[in-house]
Image (spheres, rainbow, N blue to C red):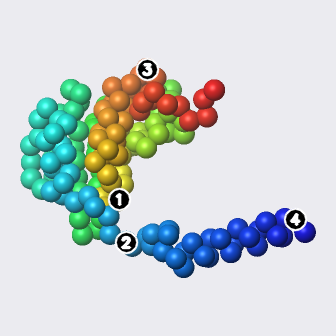
């Protein structure tokens, strides 16, 4: 009885919040765009090259590529770490494990036989602080490959 009442109350609350637009619809426009992202990159990076939607930056001595697609509301920060034939199976296992508890919002991934640190996200939903933090996490993953494999000081599930 208590469980049914609790579920009913939760469902009512969710429906009420959705009908009041307290929870923003998924297609609501955000604020970040290419112009704002480029301004942020120029503020926090030591070097910015490229054109709108395709930049190569240097952040914390790491080369990071920033790619955006405003029409599809997507963006990514990526930093090449190593060719796959240069890393061991054990290092790859550490990367996969780190994706679960130490990589936070950025991730280790593989594309075209290269191991990358990557952050992939809807462009419009980024705030300046979150974008700056994402850059930091990508740089940290690239830097910490082979040691802590962490994107920052926080470890999910740590004591």
| Residue 77 visible, this orientation | yes
Residue 127 appears left or right of 39:
right
Relative to 75, does residue 72 appear above or below in the rendering?
Answer: below
User: Can residue 86 be seen in the rendering of this structure?
Assistant: no
Q: Quadrant of residue 146?
A: top left
- Whether residues under marks 2 and 3 lie with C-beta atoms below 8 angstroms apart, the answer is no
**The image quarter in which residue 1 lies:** bottom right
Q: Residue furthest top?
A: 147
**Residue 119 image offset from top left, x and y in percent:** 35, 46
| Picture quadrant of residue 143 | top left
Dot 4 surroundings within 10 Å: few (below 14), some, or many (20 or more)? Answer: few
Q: Position of residue 22 (x, y in %)?
A: 50, 69
Q: What is the secondary structure assignment of the residue under circle 4?
A: helix
Give the residue at x 50% y 68%: 23
Kindly identify the residue that appears in the image at 22 percent across and 47 percent down.
66
- Between 121 and 23, the residue placed more toward the observer is 23
Name the side, left or right, on which 26 lies relative to 9.
left
Could you tell me how far apart the alpha carbons at marks 3 and 4 are, in whole angstroms? 50 Å
Q: Which residue is mark 1?
A: 125
Residue bearing mark 4: 2
Q: Which mark is residue 28?
A: 2
């Amino acid at each position: 009885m208590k469980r049914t009442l609790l579920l009913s109350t939760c469902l009512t609350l969710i429906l009420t919040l959705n009908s009041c637009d307290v929870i923003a619809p998924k297609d609501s426009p955000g604020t970040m765009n290419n112009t704002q992202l480029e301004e942020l990159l120029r503020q926090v990076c030591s070097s910015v090259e490229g054109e709108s939607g395709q930049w190569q930056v240097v952040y914390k001595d790491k080369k990071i590529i920033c790619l955006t697609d405003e029409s599809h509301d997507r963006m990514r920060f990526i930093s090449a770490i190593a060719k796959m034939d240069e890393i061991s199976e054990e290092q790859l296992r550490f990367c996969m494990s780190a994706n679960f508890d130490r990589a936070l919002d950025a991730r280790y991934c593989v594309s075209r036989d290269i191991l990358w640190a990557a952050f992939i996200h809807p462009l419009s939903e980024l705030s300046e602080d979150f974008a700056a933090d994402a850059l930091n996490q990508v740089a940290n993953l690239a830097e910490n490959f082979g040691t802590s494999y962490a994107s920052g000081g926080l470890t999910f599930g740590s004591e």
